[in-house]
Structure formats: C-alpha cells, structure tokens
Image (cartoon, rainbow, N blue to C red):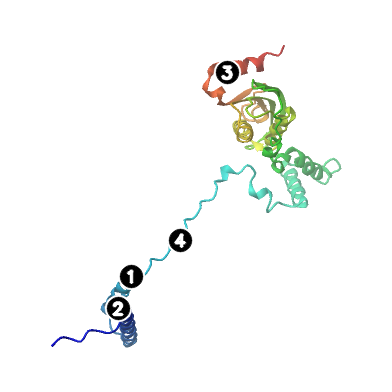
C-alpha cells in the first residue's frame, strides 16, 4: 500500500514545527524553574535549553549592530576652552581672588591705595584677556576678490602685540610679521593685525601663538603659502628667574610655498628686515 500523502502545504507544516519547538522550549523552561527552586544543579538543563534556543534562532535575521561611537574632538582642537562659556566665576568672586593675592603678597587690600585695586584689575583683565571671547576665523571671512589678478606676496610687518605667559602670567610683548600668497583674493590688512591680537590676548606661549596665527590663515584663506614670524621679549625672563633683560625670542611658521622653497623664506626675511 502507498502512504497517504500529506494534504497540507509546506508552509503549514513549517508553522506547526515552529509551534512544537516553542512548546518544547516552554516545557524545558518550566522544568528548569522547578529544578532551580528545588536546589538541583541546573547547568545541564540550562545548556540544553540555550542550545535549542540558538538552533531555533538561526533562521532569523541577525540583530542590527549598534552604531559606532564617534570619538569627541581632542581638547587641542578647540580654539577656545569650553570653560570660558560655562562655569565662569562672577565678577565679585574675581575681585575677592585679587584681594586674597594682595594679602598673600603682604599688603593690606583695605588701605586707601589698594581699596579699588581689585575692581581695576578685574576690569583690566577683561581687556587683556579679551581674546578668549573673539573668533579669529570670523575676522577673515570677508575676502576681496577684485584685486586685478594680483597673486604676489602680501606682507604686513611690525604688528605690535602684548600677551601673557601662561606659565607665570607675566607679560611678553613684541612684533609679528605675516606674509601670504593669495589664491582667491585678499583680506583687509587690519584683519591680520586683529588676528594677532585675538591670540595674543590669551594666556599663551610664543610658539603656540605663532602656530595659531598660521593655522587660521591657512584654514580660511587657503593661500599658496604662509609665513609668520614673531619676535618678543619675555618679562618672565627679565624680571624673575635668570633676570636677563633685552633678550629676544624669535619663532617662525612656514607653510606651502614658503616651506617648500628656501628662496621664498629668504625673500620673506629680507622684506621683514629691510626697514628702508
């Protein structure tokens, strides 16, 4: 005799098999619970149950992988510290700190000559360190493209600046010289001086300030080449420590055409030194 063929379609049989598997899993789960409540070792039943669950899940779509986390920008990539915008002390707290320093120095902040000094110092600091609230990028956004095809060197030299050493909060001052080869246009000459002031009016090192000036010009103007020279005298070297006045420190940054061609560096240095 021939066996009677199954009249149900294949999908119905698969559905029945899945229902039977689910029922078996529920039964095993129930027995596992009873085993755990009775204090018996559930390791073997638990392993079998997990194996059956894994086998039953093989035909299902894999769970989507979590999106990779994007690493935050390093602190060195931020031109202005976040703490400037958040958690800033009040003016009263700043003045109280100045009075504390006056007492620590050995004087009386309540005597007539020093009574208004804390307020004056805080007001002066607002200007001396005003660069923290300025955006150097925005200063260079306006470019003048109608320069009749001019593409030769643009040099602004002898830009005076005053800054403060971040190690001792003592002033250093000097001159900055900036040159670049324009590509799409030029910026107002005063903007380059404002860029120098923006970075100088922060706690600085001369090396960092020189690089920052070159960085912002390169990122905004995208010229063929950039040359920056900063020469300064540091009062932290003249007033304290080794106490050598009149010592000059020179730092430079060369990018693009100035970095790749020594003749361009010579041309820049010659133009800077030629005062006639």
Question: Disc 3 designates what residue?
Answer: 264
* Label ID, residue 66: 4
Disc 2 secondary structure class: helix
Residue 234: quadrant of the picture: top right
In primary-sequence order, the first of circles 1 and 3 is 1
Find disc 1 in the rendering and name its residue: 59
Q: Is residue 108 visible?
A: no
Task: Work out whether residue 73 can be spotted.
Answer: yes
Say if 137 sits above or below 27 in the image.
Answer: above
Q: Residues within 10 Å of mark 3 (few under 14, many from 20)?
A: some
Q: CA distance from mark 4 to mark 2?
A: 36 Å
Foreground mark, 2 or 1, reads 2
Q: Earlier in the sequence, mark 4 or mark 3?
A: 4
Provide residue 69's location: percent of width, then percent of height: 49, 55
Point out the residue furthest to the top here: 276
Q: Quadrant of the N terminus?
A: bottom left
Of the numbered discs 3 and 2, the one sitting upstream in the chain is 2
Q: Is tag 2's residue or tag 1's residue first in the polypeptide sequence?
A: 2
* Disc 3/disc 2 C-alpha distance (Å): 82 Å
Mark before the other along the chain sequence, 4 or 2:
2
Instruction: Name the foreground residue: 69 vs 80.
Output: 69
> Mark 4 or mark 2: which is in front?
2
Furthest residue toward right: 112
Q: Between marks 2 and 1, how big is the CA–CA gap?
A: 16 Å
């Amino acid at each position: 005799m021939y066996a009677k063929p199954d009249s149900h379609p294949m999908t119905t049989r698969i559905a029945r098999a899945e229902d039977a598997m689910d029922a078996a899993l529920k039964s095993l789960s129930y027995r596992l619970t009873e085993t755990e409540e009775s204090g018996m070792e559930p390791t073997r039943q638990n392993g079998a149950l997990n194996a059956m669950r894994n086998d039953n899940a093989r035909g299902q779509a894999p769970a989507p992988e979590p999106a990779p986390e994007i690493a935050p920008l390093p602190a060195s990539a931020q031109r202005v510290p976040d703490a400037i915008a958040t958690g800033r002390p009040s003016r009263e707290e700043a003045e109280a700190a100045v009075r504390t320093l006056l007492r620590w120095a050995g004087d009386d902040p309540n005597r007539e000559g020093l009574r208004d000094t804390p307020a004056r110092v805080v007001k002066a600091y607002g200007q001396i360190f005003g660069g923290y609230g300025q955006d150097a990028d925005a200063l260079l956004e306006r470019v003048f493209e109608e320069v009749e095809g001019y593409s030769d060197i643009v040099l602004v030299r002898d830009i005076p600046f005053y800054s403060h050493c971040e190690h001792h909060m003592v002033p250093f001052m000097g001159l900055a010289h900036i040159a670049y080869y324009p590509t799409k246009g030029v910026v107002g000459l005063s903007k380059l001086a404002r860029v120098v002031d923006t970075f100088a009016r922060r706690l600085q090192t001369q090396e960092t300030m020189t690089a920052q000036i070159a960085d912002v010009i390169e990122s905004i103007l995208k010229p063929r080449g950039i040359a920056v020279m900063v020469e300064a005298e540091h009062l932290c070297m003249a007033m304290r420590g080794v106490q050598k006045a009149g010592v000059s420190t020179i730092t430079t940054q060369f990018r693009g055409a100035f970095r790749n061609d020594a003749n361009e560096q010579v041309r820049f240095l010659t133009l800077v030194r030629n005062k006639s």
